[in-house]
Image (spheres, helix red, strand yellow):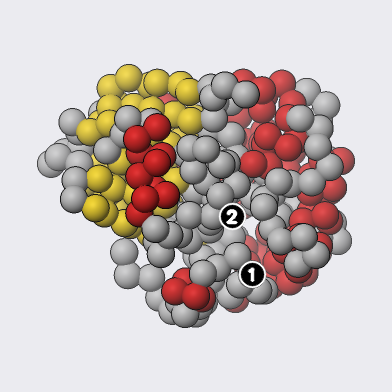
């Protein structure tokens, strides 16, 4: 299938990049408040996908996102829901704990989204491009070719280079893997903005997003997001969603590290220095 790519043209002013809302209404509410505090309009906010996911309020979260008016690309979850598939398409190993948990939360999300939701997901692009501070920026979920590819800081640069080349970009903003990071080779950058709906396995209940600023050239900064995780946990309990993931909202530690390469496994429970 041909890729749907939206070009936003030249953007300016502060921008807010984030991903993995994961049906976490409380995290999204805090993020929209943060955008207001930074005076960032919705058209300068971009989600790297997976608005829907692990947590307990899929429709409420989607409604808030749509009312807000930020941009988003398709995550693998949106693609699977759009196409009425029976699994989340996260590329978990078959039979793994993540695979088993995903059967529960994906079925819940699918059953609790309005029937017209698929029309919204059909409107979302696979990728976004824009010009910013003299650089060409591309937005992907996993990678250009594979929406569910787990790309980490330790991932070989050649794999990242393929997405940069495909989008004719100097900077990629990515999501999916759940960990914020920066990787640079000469004048090219791969920036994972992090996800707001689930902690980054760093032992902290706060989650991650990213600000970029063109006031003095191209500047970027990861920022932590505090939100009412106790209410998010209660919503997960109320709806009988995996309590291992609910616990992660509080502890900041993942239930398992099945998807992580060894280099990223060693970071568990450690503070990020970005």
Q: Nearer the viewer, residue 155 or 198?
A: 155
**Residue 219, percent across and down?**
22, 46
Q: Nearer the viewer, residue 35 or 199?
A: 199
Vertical arrangement, residue 240 with respect to residue 69, above or below: below
Question: Total number of numbered labels?
Answer: 2
Q: Nearer the viewer, residue 93 or 246?
A: 93
Left or right: 179 in relation to 16: right
Q: CA distance from mark 2 to mark 1?
A: 19 Å
Quadrant location, the N terminus: top right
Quadrant location, the C terminus: bottom left
Identify the residue at horizontal 40%, vertical 21% (top origin). Answer: 7
Q: Secondary structure at mark 2?
A: loop
Camera-side mark, 2 or 1? 1
**Residue 160, percent across and down?**
39, 48
Identify the residue at horizontal 83%, vertical 26% (top origin). Answer: 115
Residue topped by disc 2: 197
Residue 257 seen in this snapshot: yes
Residue topped by disc 1: 258
Vertical arrangement, residue 193 with respect to residue 85, above or below: below
Identify the residue at horizontal 65%, vertical 74% (top origin). Answer: 256
Left or right: 118 in relation to 230: right
Identify the residue at horizontal 49%, vertical 43% (top origin). Answer: 143
Which quarter of the picture shows residue 223? bottom left
**Residue 120, percent across and down?**
67, 24
Q: Residue furthest left?
A: 216
Tell me the tag on residue 57: none
Q: Earlier in the sequence, mark 2 or mark 1?
A: 2
Residue 222 seen in this snapshot: no
């Amino acid at each position: 299938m041909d890729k749907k790519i939206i070009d936003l043209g030249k953007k300016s002013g502060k921008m807010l990049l984030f991903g993995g809302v994961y049906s976490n209404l409380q995290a999204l509410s805090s993020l929209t408040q943060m955008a207001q505090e930074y005076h960032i309009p919705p058209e300068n906010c971009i989600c790297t996908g997976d608005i829907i996911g692990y947590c307990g309020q899929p429709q409420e979260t989607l409604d808030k996102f749509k009312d807000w008016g930020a941009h988003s690309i398709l995550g693998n979850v949106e693609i699977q829901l759009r196409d009425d598939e029976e699994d989340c398409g996260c590329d978990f190993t078959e039979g793994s704990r993540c695979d088993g948990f995903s059967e529960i939360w994906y079925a819940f999300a699918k059953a609790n989204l309005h029937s017209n939701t698929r029309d919204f997901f059909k409107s979302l692009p696979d990728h976004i491009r824009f010009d910013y501070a003299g650089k060409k920026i591309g937005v992907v979920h996993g990678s250009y070719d594979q929406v569910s590819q787990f790309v980490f800081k330790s991932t070989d640069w050649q794999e990242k280079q393929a997405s940069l080349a495909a989008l004719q970009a100097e900077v990629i903003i990515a999501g999916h893997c759940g960990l914020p990071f920066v990787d640079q080779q000469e004048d090219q950058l791969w920036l994972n903005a992090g996800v707001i709906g689930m902690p980054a396995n760093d032992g902290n209940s706060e989650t991650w997003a990213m600000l970029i600023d063109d006031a003095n050239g191209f500047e970027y900064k990861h920022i932590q997001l505090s939100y009412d995780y106790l209410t998010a946990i209660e919503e997960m309990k109320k709806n009988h969603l995996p309590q291992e993931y609910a616990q992660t909202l509080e502890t900041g530690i993942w239930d398992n590290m099945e998807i992580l390469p060894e280099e990223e496994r060693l970071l568990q429970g450690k503070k990020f220095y970005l």
